[in-house]
Image (cartoon, rainbow, N blue to C red):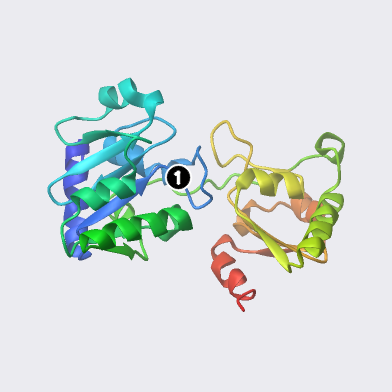
């Protein structure tokens, strides 16, 4: 697939195989990051757009790319107007555009790892008014047609010295535990990569120019925590730094870890 037009056509073919009438492609990752690793650069791969914020919608007979005023010129330089409609946000939201353009009875797919609950609720309401349906997918169809998609970074985690961090991880987790007590909560879930780096005094190299690592964390009311991260990223030095108060799990066990708090 040497051209972006070919990639768009391939995605439409995949959507047809998946019995979907459209799909939403945001520029983000599972952590709602603005700056993402190469494996999550789906919008750039599909459209050619190289900005740090944007989304796209692909329908059978239409496709639109959504950017704010920072990218008015850039998006037109990098993305073909023959294949894509340029839509300005916040003047028009993705949900509103879907409500105006999706066909009655259409099934519009989205990757639930890449959207907020508020966005899902807005999009679902707009589509329902149109007689269409928002459908969560188990696997992202862009990934299915991206043959050379990079793997997530395997760079090892590093330790941020306490002197530079300003406080130990234990002290930071104790502050969180105190806050949880005042909120009468059992735990707090951390998905933002910079928050995890701060709480655990660790740094990573998984996103260009951003010292974070791909991980999730859950901090409990007793000050202990669960860290979900690829095991190969954990050196002996990092394991020693984290200590026994941090329980370690593979990154793909995060959803299962959340299930323990259901109730």
Between 15 and 240, the residue placed more toward the observer is 15
- Is 55 or 151 nearer to us in this picture? 55
Is residue 245 in sight in this rendering? no
Determine whether, in the image, residue 45 is placed left or right of residue 6. right
In this view of the protein, can residue 214 be seen by the observer?
yes
**From the image, which quarter does the N terminus lie in?**
top left
- Identify which residue is drawn at 16% across, 44% down: 62
Q: Position of residue 113 (x, y in %)?
A: 45, 57
Decide: is 152 above or below 105.
above
Q: Is residue 153 left or right of residue 234?
A: left
Q: Which residue in the structure is indicated by mark 1?
A: 28
- Is residue 231 shown above or below 168? below
Residue furthest out toward the front = 129
At horizontal 17% and vertical 65% (from top left) the residue drawn is: 105
Res 2 → quadrant: top left
Element at badge 1?
loop
- Kindly identify the residue that appears in the image at 34 percent across and 43 percent down: 93
Residue 94 in the image, given as x and y percentages of width and height: 32, 45
Image quadrant where one finds the C terminus? bottom right
Say if 223 sits above or below 52 in the image: below
Q: Is residue 5 above or below residue 105?
A: above
């Amino acid at each position: 697939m040497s051209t972006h037009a070919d990639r768009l056509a391939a995605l439409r073919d995949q959507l047809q195989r998946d019995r979907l009438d459209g799909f939403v492609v945001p520029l983000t990752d599972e952590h709602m990051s603005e700056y993402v690793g190469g494996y999550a650069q789906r919008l750039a791969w599909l459209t050619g757009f190289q900005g740090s914020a944007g989304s796209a919608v692909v329908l059978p007979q239409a496709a639109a790319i959504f950017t704010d005023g920072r990218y008015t010129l850039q998006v037109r330089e990098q993305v073909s107007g023959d294949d894509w409609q340029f839509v300005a946000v916040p003047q028009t939201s993705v949900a509103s555009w879907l409500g105006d353009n999706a066909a009655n009875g259409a099934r519009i797919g989205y990757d639930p790892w890449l959207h907020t609950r508020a966005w899902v609720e807005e999009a679902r309401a707009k589509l329902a008014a149109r007689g269409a349906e928002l459908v969560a997918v188990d696997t992202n169809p862009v990934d299915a047609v991206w043959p050379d998609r990079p793997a997530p970074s395997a760079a090892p985690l590093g330790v941020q010295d306490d002197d530079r961090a300003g406080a130990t991880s234990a002290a930071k987790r104790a502050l969180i535990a105190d806050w949880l007590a005042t909120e009468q909560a059992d735990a707090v879930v951390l998905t933002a990569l910079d928050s995890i780096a701060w709480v655990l005094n660790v740094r990573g190299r998984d996103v260009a120019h951003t010292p974070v690592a791909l991980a999730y964390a859950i901090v409990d009311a007793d000050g202990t925590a669960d860290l979900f991260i690829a095991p190969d990223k954990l050196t002996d030095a990092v394991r020693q730094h984290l200590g026994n108060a941090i329980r370690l799990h593979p990154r793909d066990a995060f959803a299962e870890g959340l299930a323990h708090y259901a109730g």
